[in-house]
Image (cartoon, helix red, strand yellow):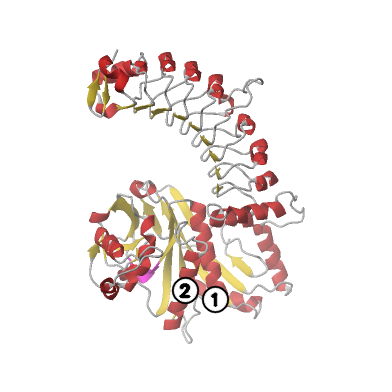
Amino acid sequence: MAKLYLDGIKVGADHLDSIHEFSVKRADVSDEDAAIISKGEPMTIFSAKKLATLKVDGFQDLTQIHSTVGKCTHLLQLTYIRNGLLGISPEISQLASLSYLDLTENKLSEVPLEVYSIKTLQTLILARNHLTDASFPPPPEDLKPLLPELRHVDLSHNKMSVLPAWLGKVEQVTELLASDNEISSLCLELLMKGHLRVLDLSRNKIKEFPYELTELKKIKTLLLVENPVSDRRLLKLIVQHGDTKPKSVLDYLGTHASKARSSDTLSQSEGRKELSKKSKGQAVHPRHLIKVVRNPNPLVVQATKSVRAHRPYMVCTIIRKLDLLQAKDIKKFLAVQTAVHEGAGNKRKLAAIATHNVSLLTPPLVYDARPLGEVLLIPIGYENEMSAKEFVDLLETNRAPSRGGKRSAAVKKTTDPQAAALSKYLGLVQGHDKIALLEDGDKRVLSLPPLTNCAHTMLTEGVHDVLVEVTSSRSLQGCKTVLDGLIMEMLQRGMKSREKEKGSDAHSDTDDLEVLCDDLQEGIQSWLCLEQVRVTDENGTLLSVYPSRTDLQFDLSSVLVQGF
């Protein structure tokens, strides 16, 4: 039998009785020992009488856990991750003390009945396997209560189309993670029990959420983003409040989920057509107008592989000829961004906004992520170039004291107010070895999301084409919701794409926009012209385009969208 490693030291049979924890990684063992382990032969460590924790990590050729694992009767935690497991040994039911089972990132396609017999199991992690609807056999009818101690279940990144029915028979599950599957229907019996505090169903195929979801009275985190939800208002609530204020989502479901949609409800595109017809007869009176234009040579942002693994989501648009002629207009625009950051952006946790004067940037644009020490920028509000690491250190130095804490008088005098204001967002980047950035064709860093814009493309007084970028580490829909919110807030505060100069013969899309406003009615209070921007990967595969037909889903009685 193979000798294995415990913190770099080979362990033989004479030391087994003193071992309580044992961890072995493929990178830490010789090829000879790795080959023996991967054969699935009984391991010496299985004879350790007091073994409580066992972890085996990274043996891609290891397809099974040997049946002698059943000898580890004192085992509390069993972790086999990033291996090649095809199945689970039935002898696992003999682990009478097991409370934690993690089999993440294997090749499991079925779960044996014996798992249901582990009465002490509290955490079951089967993420990133090949599990389908057929992977879970029905539990025996006489096995009651079923998994009485189970609280945490992770089934994310599998291939299920429905939540397993056995979950509804477990009494006290408080956390269920099932994101990145193909789920289209839920286990109502589980929802009706009402014990869940954390539920993650992100990135599935759920079109409508059932009324039974409102039974989750104890829910603290509700993640439902990136599902093809047909109710647009519900979709926005999910993105904005699901992870922080799930009650907002549940309250809406309580009012709407059980009600069938009216047969005469218009889709957004149908509504636009209807509104266009009615506008000629002055039947409706929208207050705001958006015109979407397509450039035959659109601006393209290329998102690298590095940033797609770090802060992967981005949408952009260009606001054409935005009127920022006076200082008060710039202040208003900054106030709009702040309001959206704090509201729809959830204090930049959901998504962050950056804006740029298009005339001051040089295509092509690249969205990338790099080590902090390799990124040089001039943050907005500063004159000297610094590295991203130096900038983050500056924010850390000026970080506001924790609630109840006091800052010394000496520190108060030297505090940088701008750095102090930005320091509250440090938690969004700390703990990462890289930081996201937008760079132009002259290799100048334009923004460092979610912390700051850079000085080079700063907006000043005048009429500008403005590039708006919105990025997120959470979801693409979150980016779109925040950008929708920014556009709507600008309209409500009377911001406009500027008309042509008097006496000028020049023609542009914004000229057409004014004519359209005049033709519709005098009630139009504000209007914006948006140009589509595309985000692609290195191979030109489209990742996002904004605005698209599914964006700008506003109340048709107040906002008219033209151009689709």
Q: Dot 1: few (<14), some (14–19), or many (≥20) neighbours within 10 Å? A: few
Which residue corresponds to the image point at 52% horizontal and 72% vertical from the top-left? 490
Asked if residue 324 is positioned above or below residue 13 in the image, the reply reads below
Along the line of sight, the residue nearer the viewer: 514 or 144:
144
| Precedes in sequence: disc 2 or disc 1 | 2
Tag 1: amino acid: Arg
Tag 2: amino acid: Ala
Query: Which residue appears farthest toward the right when viewing the image?
Result: 263
* Residue 395 position within the rendered picture, expressed as x and y whole percent measured from the top left: 31, 64
Q: With 484 as the anchor, is 348 left or right in this view? A: left
- Image marks 2 and 1: residues in contact by CB distance under 8 Å: yes
What's the magenta region?
A: 355-361
Along the line of sight, the residue nearer the viewer: 217 or 272:
217
Which residue corresponds to the image point at 49% horizontal and 28% vertical from the top-left? 130
Query: Is disc 2 placed on a helix, strand or loop?
Result: helix
* Residue 507 position within the rendered picture, expressed as x and y whole percent measured from the top left: 48, 76
Distance from disc 2 to disc 1, alpha carbons, whole Å, reads 10 Å
Residue 131 shown in magenta: no
Q: With 527 as the anchor, is 304 left or right in this view? A: left
Residue for badge 2: 335
Residue for badge 1: 493
Q: With 20 as the anchor, is 174 left or right in this view? A: right
Which residue corresponds to the image point at 23% horizontal and 64% vertical from the top-left? 386
The residue mark sitting in front, 2 or 1, is 2
Query: Which residue appears farthest toward the bottom when viewing the image?
Result: 503
Question: Hey, which quadrant is residue 1 in on the image?
Answer: top left
* Residue 487 position within the rendered picture, expressed as x and y whole percent measured from the top left: 53, 67
Which quadrant is the C terminus positioned in? bottom right
Asked if residue 379 is positioned above or below residue 180 in the image, the reply reads below
* Residue 521 position within the rendered picture, expressed as x and y whole percent measured from the top left: 66, 78
Asked if residue 424 is positioned above or below residue 110 in the image, the reply reads below
